[in-house]
Image (cartoon, rainbow, N blue to C red):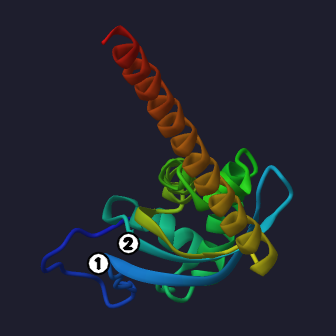
Amino acid sequence: DYTLNQGYKTKSPLTTVYKMNTEVKELTFENISVQTSDSQFVNTLIKAQVKIDSTKAFEYFSKYRDKSLEDISSVLSATIQKQLETITTQYNIMDLLGTKRDEIVNKSLELIKAELEKDGVNVLRIILVDTDAGSSIETAIANEAIAKKEAETAEYKKQKAELEGQAKVIEAQKEKEA
C-alpha cells in the first residue's frame, strides 16, 4: 500500500515487495495513424522516451501491477495516438509535413505528458521518426514545391528584365544628351 525508497529495508515474510524499473526506456510505436484538418491521414513511426515516475510508483502499480513499460506499450500507443490526433486535427497536411512539425510535436508532447502522468508514467520526449502521407499527397507536395520554385524563378526573371530595361533607358538618355 506504499512505495519503498531505494536501499535496504526489512519486511515481514507475509509482505510481497514488487521491484519496478524506473530507468528511461525508448519505445518505438509503428503505424500510428492520425488525421489532419484537411481530412488527410498520415501514418507515423514514433519513438518515445518514457520511464516510471519513482514518486508515483504506487499509482503505476495500482493500474498496471508489476508490468513493465514494454508490457503496456499498447496502452501507451493508444494514448499517444489519441493525443497526437487531438493536435493534428488542428493543422493541415502541409503543416504536419512542413514548417509547423515541431510545434505539433511539442503541443502533442504536453498533452501526452498530462495524460500519462496520472498513471505514474513520465514521457520525456517523442520523436516523429517517419511520416507517410501516401504517394498521392507526397506527389502533390512535390508538385507544389516545383510550382513555387518556378514562380520564384519567373519573379526573378521579371525583376531582372525590369532592371535591364531601366538601364537601357538611362543609357539611351545619356547618348541623347551627348
Say which element carries label 1: loop
Quadrant location of the C terminus in the rendered image: top left
Q: Quadrant of residue 82?
A: bottom right
Q: Nearer the viewer, residue 13 or 126?
A: 126
Give x and y (percent) for residue 147: 68, 57
Quadrant location of the N terminus in the rendered image: bottom left
Give x and y (percent) for residue 42: 73, 70
Give x and y (percent) for residue 27: 46, 82
Give the answer, above or below, for where 34 lies relative to 9. Answer: above
Q: Residue visible at 86% across and 57% down?
A: 39
Say which element carries label 2: strand
Give x and y (percent) for residue 23: 29, 78
Number of the label disc, if any, that sits on residue 23: 1
Q: Which of 156 and 108 is in front in this view?
A: 156
Give the answer, above or below, for where 157 lies relative to 139. Answer: above
Check whether the beta carbons of the residues at disc 1 and disc 2 lie within 8 A of each other.
yes
Q: Which residue in the protein does label 2 denote?
A: 51
Number of the label disc, if any, that sits on residue 102: none
Q: Residue visible at 51% across and 43% down?
A: 156
Give the answer, above or below, for where 32 lies relative to 59. Answer: below
Q: How far apart are marks 1 and 2 (CA)?
A: 6 Å
What kind of residue is marked 2?
A: Lys
What kind of residue is marked 1?
A: Glu
